[in-house]
Image (tube, rainbow, N blue to C red):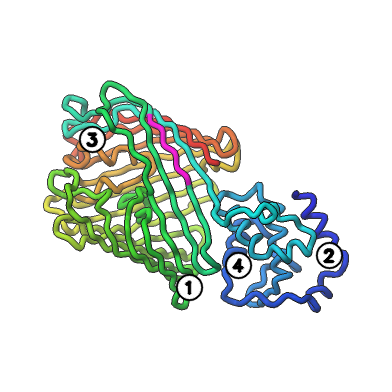
Amino acid sequence: MKKKIAAALAATFALGVTSAFAANPFSDVPAKHWAYESVSKLQKAGIVEGYSNGQFGGDKNMTRYEMAIVVAKAMTKMEKADAEQKASINKLAAEFGSELKNLGVRVEALEKNASSIKFSGETRLRYKANENANAAGDGSAAGYVGNKFAHRWRLYATGNVNEDISFAGRMVAEPNFRNNADAAGTDTAFTIDYANFTYKKAFGSVDISAGRYDMVLGYGQLAGTVGAFDAFKVAMGGDQVKAWFAIGDNTVKANTMSGGTATANKNANVTIGQVTYTPNTDLEMKLSGYFSNDSAYAYKVWALGAKYKVSPVFTVIGEYAKNQDATTDQDKSYYGQVIYKGADKAVPGSFGLFVQYWKAGAQSVDHSLSSLNFFEALTGDQFIRTNGIKAWGYGFNYTYAKNAVFAVSYQDPKSYDGSIKRDKYLYVQTNLYF
């Protein structure tokens, strides 16, 4: 297909594209058309190289014929695109299918009357040592899981209602390999992590959306890819400053402050938000927080963090968080990470090394939401909810084949004040993307 597209493009240019543009029967693509943003993102990612002098249209409106040329170029680099970029290219190909056919470019998805819904997936196989320690930091009481294998798979779906409204969803299941420490029925059932609709540029530059989301805040101390946040969301901003806020219900994942025990039939209605400032390509700063609207969920947490690319191979992350509703002095959380390179699932042989430090009070954040890289499996511990945590973490990741990544991590945690040692934690995993 790639050769056919290239040949069609060559023939088009040989016949005189400039004159064709001047007299072509296709209308201009409107200035607010979603295609401009999609192509701009693909250009920044290196998937398309623009047209003519190598630049994208900028302030100049493009005709549908010109846009089809750009889309055809993107189609020749499908193998370099990730799942999200492929979905974007397919969406563009569907939009400009008639023009592509006039160029002699076959759009197989259109010829097969393919659905506008695009699917991708991920599966993870993980071995975990000393999971779910109790308040004493070991397995001396009921509820300690110990060592086991666990399997998780996720199925992603994206689609478009029209050129302004899009859909995104993720389904997940986590079947467990049994061992003697597992109670019956501990498999995670098939669930919907997120499923939401977004209306882009609903009011000027403001996007509005509604549904279920990942509650991703800051650099992972406050909340990570935990899903199950039902909310109404508003987003806005430009290249350097972006902001969003949401009002919703996080009861599915939330825990109360009292002893760190799980919420029992109590609503966790929260307002959350984030402002991201990116002054240049090396520096990013985030101010984020979640604030309870209900006394049953005692959290008013905010965090300030930054990520800085020190060199082409080294990145540093730091973040501070505090819970204004905490009832003890364990209301603060500190996180730092130094990253060397990093495994890229699209590049076999790529790898990364990193070291992390985390000191978090028992009431500093809702530990059922935290999803720090390679600390994430510790955050549900009764040990952390009762004693807080102070730990160094070390990790390695490696792409051993395209879309196949291996990772290992080790931590030796203590309580927030250092007086209690938790059993050492280790996990080894592989992720496959399809």
Q: Amino acid at mark 2?
A: Phe
Q: Earlier in the sequence, mark 2 or mark 1?
A: 2
Residue picked out by circle 3: 414
Residue 333 in sight = no
Mark 2 closeness class: few <14, some 14–19, many ≥20 residues within 10 Å: few
Q: Secondary structure at mark 1?
A: strand
- Looking at the rendered structure, the secondary structure element under dot 3 is loop
Q: Which residue is mark 4?
A: 35
Q: Residue at x 54, y 36 (%)?
A: 404
What's the CA distance linking mark 2 and mark 1? Answer: 35 Å
Residue that appears at 32% across and 25% down: 147
Whole-angstrom CA distance, mark 4 to mark 3, is: 51 Å
State yes or no: discs 2 and 4 in contact (Cβ < 8 Å).
no
N-terminal of the two: label 1 or label 4? 4
Query: Could you tell me residue 201's position as x and y percent?
Result: 48, 73
| Residues tagged 4 and 3 counted as in contact (Cβ below 8 A) | no
Left or right: 227 in relation to 419: right
- Disc 2 designates what residue? 13
Numbered badge on residue 228: none
Mark toward the viewer: 1 or 3 = 1
Could you say where residue 325 lies in the image, as x and y percent from the top left?
16, 57
Q: Is residue 374 left or right of residue 322?
A: right
Out of 153 and 370, give the one closest to the viewer. Answer: 153
Q: Dot 4: few (<14), some (14–19), or many (≥20) neighbours within 10 Å?
A: many
Task: Indicate the position of residue 391 as horizontal and vertical percent values.
Answer: 29, 38
